[in-house]
Amino acid sequence: MKEDLVLPTPREAAAGASGEPLLVAEGLTKHFPVKGGFPVRRTVGQVQAVDGIDLTVHVGESFGLVGESGCGKSTTGRLITRLLEPTGGTISYRGRDITRASRRQLAPIRSEIQMIFQDPYSSLNPRQTVGKIISGPMEINGIDPAGGREKRVRELLEIVGLNPEHFNRFPHEFSGGQRQRIGVARALALEPKLIVADEPVSALDVSIQAQVVNLLQKVQEELGIAFLFIAHDLAVVRHFSQRVAVMYLGKVIEVGDRDSIYTRPRHPYTHALLSAVPEVNVTGGDESGRERIRLAGDVPSPINPPSGCRFRTRCWKAQDKCAAEEPPLVRLSGNRDGHLTACHFPEEPTIEAREQDIVLDPALAALEETDED
Ligand SMILES: Nc1ncnc2c1ncn2[C@@H]1O[C@H](COP(=O)(O)OP(=O)(O)OP(=O)(O)O)[C@@H](O)[C@H]1O
Ligand code: SF4
Ligand SMILES: [Mg+2]
C-alpha cells in the first residue's frame, strides 16, 4: 500500500521544539452523577470516571494513554477536546487556560484539536459523500484553502492513501480500514496541532490495524502533529508513542517515556498489563520462563472505588498501608526523570526480565514486518 505523504504546506509545527508543552491538564476530574430513587429521581452517587489526573502533551509528540475498559480513557480524551465539561482541574492549551472557555472563545482552538474515533462505521455520515465529509469541517470553520476545498480534499485523500478520484463516493463503498483513513483525512482538514485518537484501530481487522497505525505515525512525524493515542493494551502504543501513561480506575498510576515504561515498569498493574499483552508464538518455540501475571477479580466500580490505592483489591502485593493511604505519583529512585509511579511497594527496575516479558500481539508483529519493507 502506498503511504508516502505529500506535504500540503510546509508546517511550522513539524519543526516545533520537542519539549514545548502543547496541552497541560492538571488535576483533571470528571464525575458523572448517578441517578436513582422513585418516584423522585435524585443523585445517589458519582461515577468517578476521571479523578484528578495530570498530563502534558508536548508539541509534535505522540503520547499514549493505556488502561482496561472503563478506566476513564475516553472521558479524558473528551475532556481534552472539550466535548465534556470537567468537574474539576484545569486544561491549558499553548499556555492559555481553556478550562472554562466559552464556545466562542474556543472557536479558534477547536480547529487545532481534533478527534479520531474508534468506530469508523458510526463516525461517518452514511448519506454524505467523502468529499462532503472531509470538507465539512472547513466549511463550518470558514476555511477556504488556496485552490479551493475540492483540491484540498483530493490532497487529503492522497495523504491518507486513498484514491483522490473517489471523493464522490459514499462511506459504504469503502472497507473498514479505508473508512478510518477517511476519518483521518477529516481530522487533518483543519491542520490540527493535536489529534486525540480514541482506540482508532481496535475496531479494525488485525491485518488492517498495522496499516492504519503506520499512517498515523507518518502523519505524526511528517506533519508534526501531536497525538494523544488511546489504547486498551500496551502493544500498539509501544510502537507509536514516545511517552505512555497507564490509567486505572480514573487515575494515572504510572507515566514515563516508552523505554522506561516497557523495560522498567515499577507499578504492579503496568507489569500485569505488559504480561497480559496477547502473545503470538513468533518463534514457534517454547515460551516457558516467561512469567505471566493474571489479574484476579474484576475492576471495582468507579462509583465506590477502593480507599487508598485503587488497585489494591487486585494487587498481589497489597498491605495495610495500601488501604489507608493513596500512593502519590512520584519519581522513584532508580527511575529516570519523567518516569513517575504511584505505588507504596513498587517492583524492582528489572530491565533484563522485562525484555523477555514483552510479547508481540498480532497487530504489532504485522507492524514490525511492514517496517522492514
Ligand atoms: N456519560 C456518562 N454518564 C455516566 N457514566 C459515564 C459516562 N461516560 C462514561 N461513564 C463511566 O465512566 C467510566 C469511564 O468511562 P470511559 O468511557 O472513559 O472509559 P474507557 O477507559 O474509555 O473504557 P473503554 O475501554 O471501554 O472505552 C465508566 O465507568 C463509564 O461507565
Ligand atoms: S500501592 Fe499497594 S496495592 Fe497499590 S499497587 Fe502498590 S503495592 Fe499494590
Ligand atoms: Mg473508551
Image: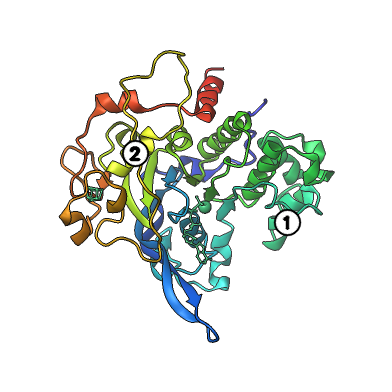
Q: Residue furthest right?
A: 168
Q: Tell whether 223 sits left or right of 93.
A: right
Q: Tell whether 256 sits left or right of 132.
A: left
* Residue 334 lies in quadrant: top left
For label 2, the crowd category at 10 Å Cα-Cα, with few meaning under 14, some 14 to 19 and many 20 or more, is some
Q: Position of residue 84 (x, y in %)?
A: 52, 66
Q: What residue is shown with label 1?
A: 136
Above or below 95: residue 332:
above
User: What amino acid is labelled 2 in the image?
Assistant: Ala
Q: Where is residue 112 in the image (x, y as percent from the top left)?
A: 55, 55
Label annotation for residue 272: 2
Question: Residue at horizontal 20%, vertical 43%?
Answer: 346
Q: In what element is the residue under mark 2?
A: helix
Locate the C terminus by quadrant: top right
Contact? badges 2 and 1 (CB < 8 Å): no
Question: Residue at horizontal 32%, vertical 46%?
Answer: 255
State whether residue 150 appears in this view: no
Q: Where is residue 223 in the image (x, y as percent from the top left)?
A: 55, 40
- Mark 2 and mark 1 lie on one chain; the one further toward the N terminus is 1
User: What amino acid is labelled 1 in the image?
Assistant: Gly
Comparing labels 2 and 1, the label whose residue is closer to the camera = 2
